[in-house]
Structure formats: C-alpha cells, structure tokens
C-alpha cells in the first residue's frame, strides 16, 4: 500500500500542469505565415472576449457552447 502511495505522489508531481492556449504572436512567426498568424490572433481575441462575457453573465456550463457560438456570430455580423 505504501508503494502505491509513493508511486501516485511521484506521478502527480511529474505530470505537467495543463495550460490554456497562448495568444499567437505574429512577430514571432516567419514572414510568409504572418498574415495567417494575425488572423488567428484576431480570432483568439474574439473568443476570449465572448468567454469573458459568458463568465460575467454567469452562463451555466451546459449553455456555454450555445452562448459562445451566438456571441461569435454576433461579433462577425457587426464586422
């Protein structure tokens, strides 16, 4: 039993923590891919904005996907 606890503890400390996806930096990308990186960054910022709105409005997890899709569609329609 003691060995199981030791192995479990080692496995927990050895596992890398999960991190969210970082924003794309167009300046760190090769010049031929810069335009695509700028588009990706803009999309990431829109997604973060909608996620922040969902957090502020305390949207339930079961309704979050529908809310985010609606928010992204509304942002796209404005532009």
Image (cartoon, rainbow, N blue to C red):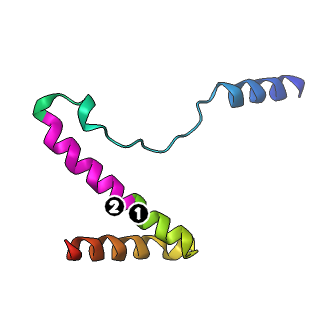
- Is residue 57 rendered to the left or right of residue 39? right
Left or right of 42, for residue 13: right
Q: Nearer the viewer, residue 17 or 74?
A: 74
Task: Locate residue 47, reporting x and y percent.
Answer: 37, 60
The quarter holding residue 56 reads bottom right
The answer to if 36 sits in the magenta stretch is yes
Span colored in magenta: 33-47
Residue 51, horizontal then vertical, whole percent: 46, 64
Identify the residue position indicated by label 2 in the image.
46
Label 1, residues with CA under 10 Å away: few <14, some 14-19, many ≥20: some
Q: Nearer the viewer, residue 26 or 65?
A: 26
Q: Are marks 2 and 1 in contact (CB under 8 Å)?
A: yes
Residue 46 lies, in percent from the top left, at: 33, 61
**Rendered position, 19 above or below 16:** below
Quarter of the view holding residue 35 = top left
Q: Quadrant of the C terminus?
A: bottom left
């Amino acid at each position: 039993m003691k060995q199981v606890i030791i192995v479990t503890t080692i496995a927990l400390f050895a596992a890398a923590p999960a991190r969210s996806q970082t924003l794309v930096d167009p300046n760190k990308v090769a010049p031929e891919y810069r335009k695509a990186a700028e588009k990706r960054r803009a999309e990431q910022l829109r997604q973060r904005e909608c996620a922040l709105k969902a957090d502020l409005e305390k949207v339930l997890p079961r309704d979050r996907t529908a809310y985010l899709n609606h928010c992204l569609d509304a942002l796209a329609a404005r532009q």
